[in-house]
Amino acid sequence: MEIVIAAAVLAAGLVVAALLLVKRAPGLVAAGGASHTASRPTSGPKQAVAAPEKADHAALEHRQEIGRLEERLVGREAALDARAAQLETHAETLARREQEAAEAHDRHVKALERTSGYSASQAKQLLLKELEDQIRHDSARLVRQIEEETKRDADRRVRNILAVVMQRLAAGHAAETTVSVVQLPADDMKGRIIGREGRNIRALEHLTGVDFIIDDTPNAVILSGFDGVRREIARMTLEKLLQDGRIHPARIEETYYQAKSELESHIIESGEAAALESNVQGLDAELIRILGRLKYRTSYGQNVLAHSVECAHLAAMMAEELGASPKTARRAALLHDIGKAVSHEVEGPHALVGGDLARRHGESEAVAHAMEAHHNEVEPQTVEAVIVQAADALSGARPGARGESLEQYVKRLRDLEQIATRHDGVDKVYAMQAGREIRVMVIPGTLDDDGAVLLSHEIAREIEQELEYPGQIKVTVIRESRATDYAR
């Protein structure tokens, strides 16, 4: 359409130009004749007749030229009109085809909707949802793959670090119990220790808070008590009395206070020796004293002071391997169990008590936090806190480092049997193989074979959720059916 409009404008311009030329031609001729006449007033008759003929001839040629020009313009205008009509026809054809294509697309969409049972919007939503699910599945698979690779690499590095640390530190362990034995030079000393009507042994037990067991064991007195400090004072008191030979209530009291004073000195020396061995400097004097008291504390038969020194070495080596602060890790690991040396007058878990003691005696927040977090009383926020946790677990997990008490062993067996007994249809339960297997006898009439399978699965899952145990526990459900008759 723009071409048609431009051609029409051009044709109109040419027509106007031609008309203007036609209007100006007679004037030009007349002006020319007047000029010739005025310039030649003395001409003859022939010259006067010839001038109009020339002017008429020129005007005729000019009009003929204009006519030809008009014919060409009219022809061009007709061609432009034909071209415009042709373009309009093409435009109408294109519009009709576009409409037909749109109608065909609508029919196709409606046919698809009828076939699929979904509208276009529903199909779009379904497609987007499937695409979203697929992308989420692919991303989850990629994330899981990355996590597995990271975990494998982390496990490999952790095993390497722990293996290096354990090989670099070889520590011995001596299992300690809640009793001490004092050897006697002669068996008749037992009577002197007991005293007239038991006054000497009563004085000893009253002052020390420890039970003196004098039985048939030859040349020995057994001191029994859970407090290691009291038991050590009692041992030192009895040994001093045996060396002196004078055993009576007044001398017992005097010797007791001497032994108590000496033990305080030994405790401070033990704390200083532990700090020196662990390469920890600048500890407060009160912290050193509390640390020394750990020499007379045990945890599952493991000496707590020796355990703390070992943890300090392990934590320092792991911190060096991981690029953390060896100084902070070493210090926190040495002090992590000092809460165990505090009496019952200070309430709370020993980890939190120890962290509070460390803050009060000038230790940094990083050290106090690592001490508090070693049993997850608070969430670990630093690498050093996690290292102290690992060092504590590694020291306690060494073969022979800690022993399981008989009471805990019996309690675990009892818990195993109770978990199985509380299910319907169970007749008898037997814990076997040191608690590594339980056999469950069920009443045949209440459970079928499938029920027995489900029961074993349920008992195994409950054991996993409620108990802590090493290795694995085998659960066997036994269902026996018997048919009995008598031949008469």
Image: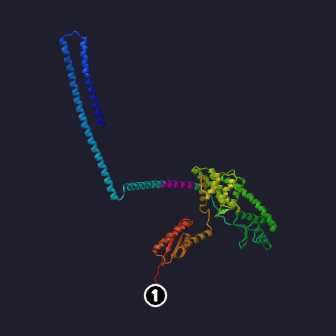
At label 1, which amino acid type do we have? Tyr
**Residue 83 picture quarter:** top left
Left or right: residue 378 compared with residue 84: right
Displayed quadrant of residue 182: bottom right
Q: Nearer the viewer, residue 81 or 97?
A: 81
Q: Give the position of the N terminus as an image quadrant.
A: top left
Residue placed at 79% from the left, 64% from the top?
Answer: 255
Q: Residue at x 22, y 9 (%)?
A: 42
**What is the number of callouts on the image?**
1
Q: Nearer the viewer, residue 37 or 374?
A: 37
Q: Is residue 467 above or below residue 446?
A: above
Residue 159 in magenta stretch: yes
92 sits left or right of 395 in the view: left
The image quadrant where one finds the C terminus is bottom left
In the image, taking residue 192 as reference, residue 477 lies left or right, namely left
- Closer-to-camera residue (215/376): 376
Q: Position of residue 303 (x, y in %)?
A: 66, 61
Residue drawn at the location 28% of the way across and 46% of the way down: 96
Q: Where's residue 308, x and y in %? A: 65, 57
Please tell me whether residue 239 belongs to the stretch shown in magenta.
no
Determine which residue is flagged by label 1.
Answer: 486
Say few, some or many: other residues with alpha carbon within 10 Å of mark 1 (under 14 / 14 to 19 / 20 or more).
few
The magenta stretch is 147-164
Q: Residue furthest top?
A: 42
